[in-house]
C-alpha cells in the first residue's frame, strides 16, 4: 500500500508518515472559512484518504475555524492505528474570516488545547509552530514561542514538534530547544528559494513538507509542465507532485482537495516515474 503512496518518511521514533499525505484545509468553506457546501462529501474524502493507505493528514484549528478538525473527528474517530494527524498553531481567525497571527506563548498553549478538544485526542502527534508570512519566513526569535510548545511536549500533550514558514536560522534556534521533526514551507516546482533548507532537513532526518505544491506557476512554466505531462501519461498537477517526490527522499506532500476524484489523481502521482530528460527539463523552470 505505501509503495503506491511514494513510500514513507520516518523523521523520529514512533513517527512514520506516508510521503503522499492529505491536506485538509480545502474542506472548509470559501477562503477556508465556514462550513463546506457539501459536508457528506467532505467526510467521504477524509475516509477515502485513509482507506487508500494515507497515514499523514494535515490540519489546523484555524481552518474554518474549528470546522475542519470537527470534520476529521466526525469522519475518522476513533482513529485507526498508525494514522498521524499533524496540526498547526500560531494563528486565529477574525469574525470576518481574516487571519490573525497569534503567537503569544499563553495563546499557543490555548490553541493546543483547542486542537486536542476538537480532534478528540489526548495527545497530538505533531504540532507545527506557524511563523512567517505565507510566502516567506521572517527572522523573529522563536525561543519563547517554541519553548511554550516544548513544555507541553514534556507534559505529554504533544509527541513531536515542527515549524512552518521558517528560516534556516529559526530552525537551528528551535532545535536547540527541542527536536524538530517536520518543516512546512512554501516550495514547489516553480518556487525553490528553500533548496538549501530541503538539503539541510534531509541531512538532519527532518521531513520537509511543501505547502502550495501546485501554486505560483508562470505561463511559461505551466507550458513546460504541460509539455512534460503530455509525454508522460499524467496530468500537469501529477507531474508537479511527482517531481517533488523525486526532489529529495525527505519530502512528504499534503496536497489538498475536497473532491474524491482529485484525491485519486493526487495519489496516482506517487506512482508516476519521470524519465531523466523530463526531470532535467523541469529542473530548469524555476524562477
Image (spheres, helix red, strand yellow):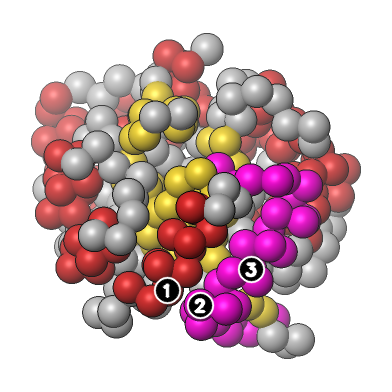
Query: x, y percentage for residue 59?
Result: 60, 53
- Distance of mark 2 from mark 3, alpha carbons? 10 Å
Res 69 quadrant in image: bottom right
The residue that appears at 55% across and 42% down in the rendered structure is 125
Is residue 108 found inside the magenta-colored segment of the image? yes
The residue that appears at 46% across and 23% down in the rendered structure is 5
Q: In this image, 268 relative to 213: left or right?
A: right
The residue tagged with tag 2: helix, strand or loop? helix
Q: Is residue 231 above or below residue 128?
A: above
Within 10 Å of disc 2 (Cα), the crowding (few <14, some 14-19, many 20+) is: some
Would you say the residues marked 2 and 1 are in contact, meaning their CB atoms lie under 8 Å apart? yes
Q: In this image, 193 relative to 51: left or right?
A: left
Instruction: Report the span colored magenta.
Output: 97-125
The answer, for residue 68, to whether it is visible in the render is: yes
The residue tagged with tag 1: helix, strand or loop? helix
Badge 2 is on which residue? 105
- Distance of mark 3 from mark 1, alpha carbons? 12 Å
Badge 3 is on which residue? 111
Query: x, y percentage for residue 162?
Result: 40, 54
Amino acid at each position: 500500500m505505501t509503495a503506491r503512496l511514494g513510500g514513507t518518511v520516518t523523521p523520529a521514533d514512533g513517527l512514520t508518515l506516508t510521503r503522499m499525505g492529505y491536506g485538509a484545509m480545502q474542506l472548509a468553506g470559501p477562503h477556508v472559512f465556514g462550513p463546506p457546501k457539501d459536508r457528506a462529501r467532505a467526510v467521504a474524502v477524509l475516509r477515502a484518504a485513509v482507506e487508500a493507505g494515507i497515514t499523514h493528514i494535515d490540519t489546523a484549528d484555524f481552518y474554518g475555524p474549528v470546522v475542519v478538525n470537527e470534520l476529521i473527528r466526525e469522519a475518522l474517530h476513533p482513529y485507526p492505528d498508525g494514522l498521524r494527524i499533524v496540526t498547526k498553531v500560531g494563528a486565529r481567525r477574525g469574525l470576518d474570516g481574516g487571519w490573525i497571527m497569534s503567537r503569544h506563548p499563553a495563546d499557543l498553549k490555548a490553541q493546543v488545547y483547542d486542537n486536542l478538544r476538537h480532534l478528540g485526542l489526548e495527545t497530538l502527534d505533531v504540532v507545527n509552530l506557524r511563523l512567517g508570512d505565507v510566502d516567506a519566513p521572517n527572522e523573529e526569535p522563536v525561543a519563547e514561542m517554541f519553548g511554550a510548545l516544548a513544555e507541553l511536549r514534556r507534559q505529554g500533550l504533544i509527541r513531536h514538534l515542527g515549524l512552518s514558514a521558517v528560516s534556516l536560522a529559526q530552525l537551528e534556534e528551535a532545535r536547540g530547544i527541542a527536536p524538530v521533526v517536520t518543516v512546512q514551507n512554501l516550495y514547489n516546482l516553480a518556487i525553490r528559494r528553500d533548496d538549501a533548507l530541503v538539503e539541510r532537513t534531509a541531512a538532519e532526518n527532518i521531513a520537509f513538507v511543501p505547502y502550495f505544491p501546485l501554486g505560483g506557476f508562470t505561463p511559461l512554466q505551466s507550458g513546460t509542465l504541460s509539455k512534460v505531462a503530455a509525454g508522460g501519461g499524467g496530468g500537469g498537477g501529477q507531474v508537479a507532485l511527482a517531481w517533488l517526490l523525486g526532489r529529495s527522499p525527505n519530502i512528504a506532500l499534503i496536497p489538498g482537495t475536497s473532491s474524491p476524484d482529485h484525491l485519486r489523481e493526487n495519489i496516482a502521482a506517487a506512482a508516476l516515474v519521470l524519465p531523466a530528460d523530463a526531470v532535467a527539463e523541469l529542473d530548469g523552470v524555476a524562477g
